[in-house]
Amino acid sequence: MKRGLFVGRFQPLHIGHIQAIKNVLEKVEELVIIIGSSQRSHEIDNPFTAGERIEMIHKALNEAGVDRACYYTVPVPDCEMHTTWVSVVRTLSPRFDIVFSNEPLTRRLFKEEGYKIEGIQLYERELYSATEIRKRMLAGKNWEKLVSKSVATYIKEIKGIERLLEITKTDKPIK
């Protein structure tokens, strides 16, 4: 069975991520989705917990019609030494045959360990960016069109925007 690996922080998961995952699933039978920097949350660049990000992925992929049997979600923390990170990924995740990534360090680390690497076709990257979504949330601008309906609903349920505003010590949206 050909199983791929896809790494992301998903802070938050957006339509670009969903499209990339769907494209990768056309190339492999199963996909291991790594929730990178899983130990980080409640920060401006990492506002959501690993558990929240897993829920976003499951909700959005279900909404997109992706069969739950086709993917795994695995939280993986950062390592102080980059050279040990691939070992941690291997320890925490099911086996995989190929790594899908555009991130230079991720590509290099897995290449050094002998994995086949393939780039990811990005979907409207200038628009679909977690950084852009967080900026829009803080500015009180429309961010919901950049995520699936289920993710937008979930972020509202967990009061994600309020969390971001509190993290930045702002009590109202930035204009």
Image (spheres, rainbow, N blue to C red):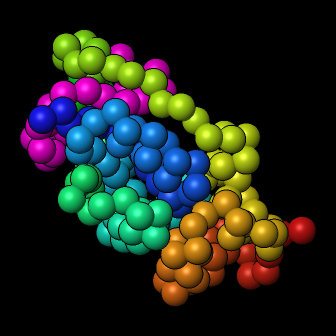
Q: Position of residue 90 (x, y in %)?
A: 14, 36
98 is higher (above) or lower (below) than 141? above
Residue 1 in the figure: left or right of residue 136: left
Count up the numbered dots: 0
For the magenta stretch, what is the residue range? 87-108
Residue 169 in the figure: left or right of residue 108: right
115 is higher (above) or lower (below) than 151? above
108 is higher (above) or lower (below) than 26? above
Please tell me whether residue 104 belongs to the stretch shown in magenta. yes
Picture quadrant of residue 91: top left
Q: Position of residue 60 (x, y in %)?
A: 46, 66
Which residue is pictured at 21% across the width and 59% down the height? 69
Which residue is pictured at 63% across the width and 76% down the height? 161
Residue 104 in the figure: left or right of residue 80: right
Looking at this view, name the residue that lies furthest to the right.
175
Q: Quadrant of the C terminus?
A: bottom right
